[in-house]
Amino acid sequence: MSYTFHTQVDGEFDDVVSRTIGALEDEGFGVLCDIDVRETLRNKLDTDFRQYRILGACNPQLAHRGLEDDLDLGTLLPCNVVVYDGDDGVVVSAVDPQRLIGLADDDDLDPIGDDARERFDRVLESL
């Protein structure tokens, strides 16, 4: 069972990153962090790597609902969405929030994972 789902997107890398951030915002997610893996590896290891960005996405309403039920849920936040140069174009991949929530083993949290998954599905479909 996969822990991510993804789509391939036509366009320039930086444009796809911007479109992805916009689509996340349209679904109520803010991007709390934006990690440029390529630049980090260049600076830390003096090595070249493909364009690769990690976007830490969080929907405050969903996060609040989950944290009200389980304070340790914060260890699973934010949900990461990655944008990278694939072999045949730009790929956008998102963690499956249902799988993340499943780690908590609390059925009361399942609707939050379902809601987040539906939102991420719409984000990827819109790209």
Image (cartoon, rainbow, N blue to C red):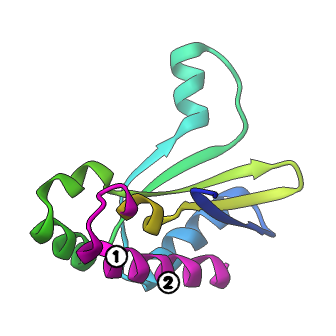
The answer to whether residue 90 is left or right of residue 38 is right
32 relative to 114 in the view: left or right: left
Q: What is the span of residues highlighted in magenta in the rendered image?
A: 102-127
Please give the label number shown on residue 1.
Answer: none
Q: Is residue 121 magenta?
A: yes
Q: Residues within 10 Å of mark 1 (few under 14, many from 20)?
A: some
Q: Nearer the viewer, residue 56 or 95?
A: 95
Q: Position of residue 101 (x, y in %)?
A: 36, 63
- Between the residue at mark 2 and the residue at mark 1, the CA separation in whole angstroms equals 12 Å
- Residue 5 sits in quarter: bottom right
Residue labelled with disc 1: 110
Depth check, front residue: 105 or 50? 105
Residue 118: which disc? 2
Q: Tell me where residue 94 appears, x and y as whole percent.
A: 56, 62
Quadrant where the N terminus lies? bottom right
Q: Amino acid at mark 2?
A: Glu
Rendered position, 111 above or below 74: below
* Image position of 52 with respect to 122: above or below: above
Q: Which residue sits at x=57%, y=56%?
A: 3
Q: x, y percentage for residue 24?
A: 47, 75
Mark 2 and mark 1 residues within 8 Å of each other at the beta carbon? no
Q: Position of residue 32 (x, y in %)?
A: 33, 57
| Dominant SS type (magenta) | helix
Please name the residue shown 44% across and 66% down the image: 97
For image coordinates 67% across by 78% down, the residue present is 127
Q: Farthest right residue? A: 88
First in sequence, mark 2 or 1: give its number. Answer: 1
Position of residue 37 in the picture relative to residue 119 (left or right): right
Q: Secondary structure at mark 2?
A: helix
Q: Amino acid at mark 1?
A: Asp
Local secondary structure at mark 1: helix
Marks 2, 1: nearer the viewer: 1
